[in-house]
């Protein structure tokens, strides 16, 4: 039963197929190799070439309108994009984005360091068994809080460094 599904009873003429293949390979109808030798073979080859040409024309008619519409849409999009002005980033925007990137990187570092620091503290306090197996849970919570508060921590550290610098410079004077 399944063998019959894939079998075709259609007999394929090799000369007809050769003519079709010649058309799709951009050969002209005058390139018929059997034109001077055998009229019957030449007709079979030419009928395959003509069949491929008719198929090509019907495909062109079928797809011509959608292709033209897509081409028009593409051209109008290009025109709209070229007419819009290019948005350039101003220096204050660049600085604010740079500060954001720096603070988010700092927050990641603070979170990771806090997590491992708290986990090590849990291991030191509760021992290897409880500290390693359960210490990561409160460490994760504390690291999340520290990550959220890291911009405030960064500002406080900056203020602390400035105050320390002022105190040290006055003590040396």
Image (tube, rainbow, N blue to C red):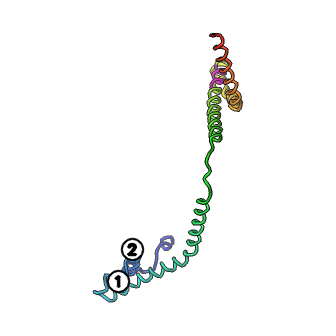
Horizontal and vertical percent position of residue 59: 51, 77
Q: Nearer the viewer, residue 54 or 90?
A: 90
Question: Toward which corner of the image does residue 89 lie, by quadrant?
Answer: top right
Q: Locate residue 152 relative to residue 11 in the image: left or right.
A: right
Q: Nearer the viewer, residue 77 or 62?
A: 77
Cα–Cα span, label 1 and label 2: 14 Å
Q: Locate residue 131 relative to residue 7 in the image: left or right.
A: right
Residue at image coords 65%, 33%: 103
Q: Residues within 10 Å of mark 2 (few under 14, many from 20)?
A: few
Horizontal and vertical percent position of residue 54: 47, 82
Name the element at disc 1.
Answer: helix
Q: Which image quarter is the C terminus in? A: top right
CB under 8 Å between callouts 1 and 2?
A: no
Is residue 6 something that shows in the picture?
yes
Question: Toward which corner of the image does residue 148 lie, by quadrant?
Answer: top right
Name the element at disc 2.
Answer: loop
* Of the image marks 1 and 2, the number of the one nearer the N terminus: 2
Residue at image coords 63%, 38%: 95
Placement of 8 over or under 131, stated as above or below: below
Horizontal and vertical percent position of residue 88: 61, 48
Horizontal and vertical percent position of residue 140: 68, 30
The residue tagged 1 is 30
Is residue 138 something that shows in the picture?
no
Q: Nearer the viewer, residue 165 or 132?
A: 165
Placement of 39 over or under 91, stated as above or below: below
Q: Residues within 10 Å of mark 1 (few under 14, many from 20)?
A: few
Question: Toward which corner of the image does residue 117 lie, by quadrant?
Answer: top right
The residue tagged 2 is 25
Q: Which residues are magenta?
A: 116-123
Identify the residue at the far bottom of this view. 39
Residue at image coords 58%, 62%: 78
Is residue 25 part of the magenta span, yes or no?
A: no
């Amino acid at each position: 039963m399944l063998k019959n599904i894939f079998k075709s009873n259609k007999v394929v003429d090799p000369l007809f197929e050769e003519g079709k293949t010649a058309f799709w390979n951009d050969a002209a109808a005058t390139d018929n190799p059997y034109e001077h030798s055998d009229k019957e073979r030449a007709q079979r080859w030419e009928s395959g070439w003509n069949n491929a040409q008719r198929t090509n024309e019907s495909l062109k008619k079928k797809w011509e309108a959608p292709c033209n519409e897509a081409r028009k849409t593409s051209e109008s999009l290009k025109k709209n994009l070229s007419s819009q002005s290019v948005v350039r980033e101003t220096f204050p925007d660049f600085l604010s984005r740079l500060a954001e990137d720096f603070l988010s990187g700092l927050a990641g570092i603070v979170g990771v360091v806090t997590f491992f620091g708290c986990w090590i503290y849990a291991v030191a306090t509760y021992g290897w068994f409880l500290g390693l197996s359960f210490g990561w849970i409160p460490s994760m919570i504390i690291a999340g809080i520290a990550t959220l508060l890291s911009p405030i921590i960064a500002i406080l550290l900056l203020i602390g460094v400035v105050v320390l610098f002022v105190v040290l410079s006055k003590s040396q004077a």
